[in-house]
Amino acid sequence: MTGTQLWTVGEVAELTRVSVRTLHHYDALGLLMPSVRSEANYRLYAPDDLSRLWRILTFRELGFPLSEIGRLLGGGPEAELSALRLQAALLQEQASRAQRRLGTVMSLLEAAERDKGGFTMSSQDLRDMFDGFDPAQYESEVQERWGDTDACRQTDERTRNYTRADWAQLKEEGEKLTSAYLTLMDRGFLPEGVQAQQVAAHPRAYFQRWFYNASPDMMRSLALMWIQDERFTHNIDRARPGLAAYQSSAVTAWAGSQVGKSE
C-alpha cells in the first residue's frame, strides 16, 4: 500500500471527532478493525476503513444498534442499500406528516386564540378526528376486562384532561406508526425480521406516553387482540388488508424478544 494515506487511531479520532475509546470499542467488537500494520506493528487505518467508519456512524445516526450495523455491513452492499431505502422511505413519510402536523397545529392555535384558551373535545369531535372510530364503543369492554387495573386508571386519568391538540398529536403519532408498518409491508420485510422489530419497539412507547405503562407482556396481549377481536382487526385493516395480522406478528415477536430483559 505504498503511497496510500494511513492514519493512527489518534489521527482518526482528531479527524472524525470520534473518541479513541469509541474506536477501540468498535475494534474490540470486530466492527471496525484497522487493516494495516506499520513496521513498528502499530495498527493503522486505511481509506477503506474510514469509509466503513462513515457508514457505521451514518447507521448509528439513523438509530441502528451496533449489532445490527455489524450484520448489515457483513451482508454486503445490497443489505446496506435495503436498510437505507427503508430508512429513506420512513424519513420521507415523517417529513410529510410533520408538514401536515404543522398545518394542524396552526389551525388549533388559531382556534385556541379565538376561543381564549384551550378546549376539550366533544364526542363528535373525536368521531370526526378518528374518521369514524369512536373509542367510547369499547368502554364497557375495557371496564369489564381491566376496570380495576393500574392501566385502566392511568388511561382514565390521562385522557380525561386531553385537549384537542393532545388528541391531534396522539392521532398523528398513531398514523406515523401505521405508515412505518405499511412501508415494511411494501418492502417485503417479514414481521419477525430485524427491520420490522425496530418499528415494533415503538408502540410500547406510544402507549406509555399517551395511555398507561405497558409491559412487554401487556403489549403481547394487545397484539393478540388486534387479530382476535374483529372490531380491532376491521379498524386497523382500513389502512390496508392484512395490516392487523402483520403488526400483531411484529409486536408479538418483539415482546417475546424482551423476555429476561430488565423493564
Image: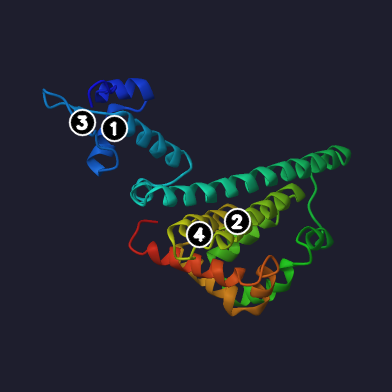
First of labels 1, 3 by sequence position? 1
First of labels 1, 4 by sequence position? 1
Label 1 to label 4: alpha-carbon separation? 30 Å
Category of crowding for the residue at label 2, using alpha-carbon neighbours closer than 10 angstroms: few (below 14), some (14–19), many (at least 20)? many
Label 2 to label 3: alpha-carbon separation? 45 Å
Label 3 to label 4: alpha-carbon separation? 40 Å
* Residue annotated with mark 2: 177
Label 2 to label 1: alpha-carbon separation? 34 Å
Q: Residue at x 38, y 63 (%)?
A: 257
The reply to whether residue 207 is in sight is yes
- Residue closest to the far right: 114
Q: Nearer the viewer, mark 2 or mark 3?
A: 3
User: Which mark, by number, is residue 36?
Assistant: 3
- 80 vs 107, left or right, is left
* Residue annotated with mark 1: 23
The reply to whether residue 222 is in sight is no
**Image x and y of residue 38, in percent:** 16, 25
**Image x and y of residue 134, in percent:** 75, 67
Secondary structure of the residue carrying numbered label 2: helix
Q: Nearer the viewer, mark 1 or mark 4?
A: 1
Q: Residue at x 65, y 72 (%)?
A: 241
Which corner quadrant of the image does residue 186 belong to?
bottom right
User: Which mark, by number, is residue 11?
Assistant: none
**Image x and y of residue 147, in percent:** 60, 71
Secondary structure of the residue carrying numbered label 4: helix
**Image x and y of residue 54, in percent:** 40, 34
Q: Quadrant of the C terminus?
A: bottom left
Category of crowding for the residue at label 3, using alpha-carbon neighbours closer than 10 angstroms: few (below 14), some (14–19), many (at least 20)? some
* Residue annotated with mark 4: 200
Category of crowding for the residue at label 1, using alpha-carbon neighbours closer than 10 angstroms: few (below 14), some (14–19), many (at least 20)? many
First of labels 2, 4 by sequence position? 2
